[in-house]
Each structure stands twice: as structure tokens, then as C-alpha cells.
């Protein structure tokens, strides 16, 4: 897990630290369509950085960094779900999802990410919220409080991915699991499967 062994600024501003040397001198770079982070202090290039910004985060009693995130399973009329491959760590199939901001509820965060990533809006049905350890993100946390939602979608199947990914895919849950999903989406698919297929 990502232990925080330095003092985090509480000024409300945006900060980004190297995951290796913990110095705040990191820049985002693009290597062949993949987003990475280069530290100008130690020279390391990593798929992650430690971000402290508007996202909700906390440090637990063991000095481990936690984030709060939400995601939406978008189901079409044929019973397939909307997935896309991320171009930012982790690089597997995902659903529209992301970090919850400090002034948002889990549902508001999910709705915002859904609109930002795939341009869809609609009524969300809450499926499950749980703490997931082992869910690593590009912003440095390895543990998240994660909320899953469902959206019944009857719009056009041609979806343009607006950020953080490649072409949209409509897949069954089994098809997506065979192709390989990001850890937390795979986990929440298993946890919510009976609700998703009801």
C-alpha cells in the first residue's frame, strides 16, 4: 500500500509528488499514447504520481493513502455493458469512473465522471459501496472507498470516449472479464453480479 511518509500541504492547492523520491517536481508526459509521470528531481519515469488536489482523500491510522471513487455500469437494451480501455494507469478495461471530489457525494461524482468520460447523463441506481484494498490508481492510492452505480441506457450505441481511454466496447460481463478489467471493476462486477443481471 501507499504509505504517506511526508507532510501533506493543507493549503487546498494542487500538488503532485514523485512516488519514488517524494519530491514535488513531477511532470505528466505522453509515451506512445500512454500517460506517464517523470520526476525532474530523481529522473524516474513512472505510471503513477502522488496527487493531492480536489479529490477526496484521507490517511488512515497506518499512514496509508485512501481515495474515494465511483463508477457506472452502463447497460444497453441488449444487456451489454459499456467498457473502454484506459490510456492512463491502470491500463485494462474499465467502466466510466473516477475520483469523487471533496464537495461531491458518491453519486454526484459518478454522474460527473460519466458525463466527462463518455458524454452520457441519466438516472443512476446505487448498487454497492465498499472499501477495496489493492485498487491502485494513477494518483497514487492503493486503497479506495468505491461506489458502483447502474444506468439503463437506450441511446445510440456509438459512444465517443472523451477522456482517459480508447474506443467504446459493448460487452457482456463474461466477455469483459475474459478481456481483463482493471482490478476494482473486476472486483465490483463480481460483488454486484446478481444485481447487474437481475
Image (tube, rainbow, N blue to C red):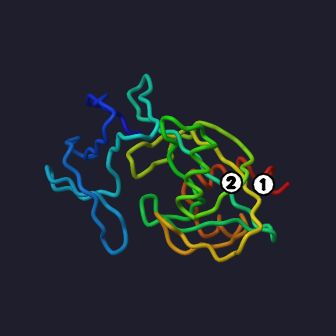
SS at badge 2: helix
Dot 1: few (<14), some (14–19), or many (≥20) neighbours within 10 Å?
some
| Residue furthest top in the image | 61
Dot 2: few (<14), some (14–19), or many (≥20) neighbours within 10 Å?
many
* Position above or below: 63 against 87: above
* Position above or below: 182 against 9: below
Report the side of 132 relative to 62 (left or right).
right
Q: Nearer the viewer, residue 158 or 144?
A: 158
Query: The C terminus is located in which quarter?
Result: bottom right
The residue positioned 60% from the left and 54% from the top of the image is 185
| Residue furthest left in the image | 41
Any mark on residue 196, and which?
A: 1
Q: Earlier in the sequence, mark 1 or mark 2?
A: 2
Q: Nearer the viewer, mark 1 or mark 2?
A: 1
Q: Nearer the viewer, residue 104 or 150?
A: 104
Query: The N terminus is located in which quarter?
Result: top left
* Residue 197 x, y percent position in the rendering: 82, 57
* Residue 184 x, y percent position in the rendering: 57, 50
Decide: marks 1, 2 in contact (CB < 8 A)? yes
* Position above or below: 56 against 25: above
The residue positioned 77% from the left and 67% from the top of the image is 154
Amino acid at each position: 500500500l501507499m504509505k504517506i511518509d511526508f507532510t501533506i500541504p493543507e493549503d487546498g492547492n494542487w500538488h503532485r509528488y514523485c512516488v519514488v523520491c517524494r519530491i514535488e517536481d513531477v511532470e505528466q508526459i505522453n509515451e506512445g499514447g500512454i500517460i506517464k509521470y517523470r520526476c525532474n528531481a530523481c529522473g524516474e519515469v513512472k505510471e503513477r504520481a502522488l496527487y493531492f488536489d480536489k479529490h477526496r482523500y484521507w490517511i488512515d491510522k497506518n499512514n496509508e493513502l485512501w481515495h474515494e471513487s465511483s463508477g457506472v455500469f452502463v447497460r444497453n437494451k441488449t444487456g451489454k455493458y459499456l467498457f473502454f480501455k484506459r490510456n492512463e494507469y491502470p491500463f485494462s478495461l474499465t467502466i466510466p469512473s473516477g475520483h469523487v471530489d471533496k464537495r461531491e457525494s458518491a453519486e454526484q461524482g459518478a454522474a460527473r465522471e460519466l458525463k466527462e468520460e463518455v458524454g452520457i447523463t441519466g438516472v443512476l441506481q446505487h448498487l454497492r459501496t465498499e472499501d477495496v484494498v489493492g485498487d491502485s490508481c494513477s494518483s497514487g492510492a492503493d486503497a479506495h472507498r468505491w461506489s458502483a452505480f447502474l444506468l439503463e441506457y437506450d441511446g445510440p450505441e456509438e459512444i465517443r470516449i472523451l477522456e482517459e481511454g480508447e474506443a467504446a466496447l459493448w460487452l457482456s460481463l463474461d466477455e469483459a472479464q475474459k478481456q481483463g478489467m482493471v482490478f476494482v471493476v473486476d472486483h465490483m462486477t463480481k460483488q454486484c453480479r446478481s444485481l447487474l443481471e437481475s
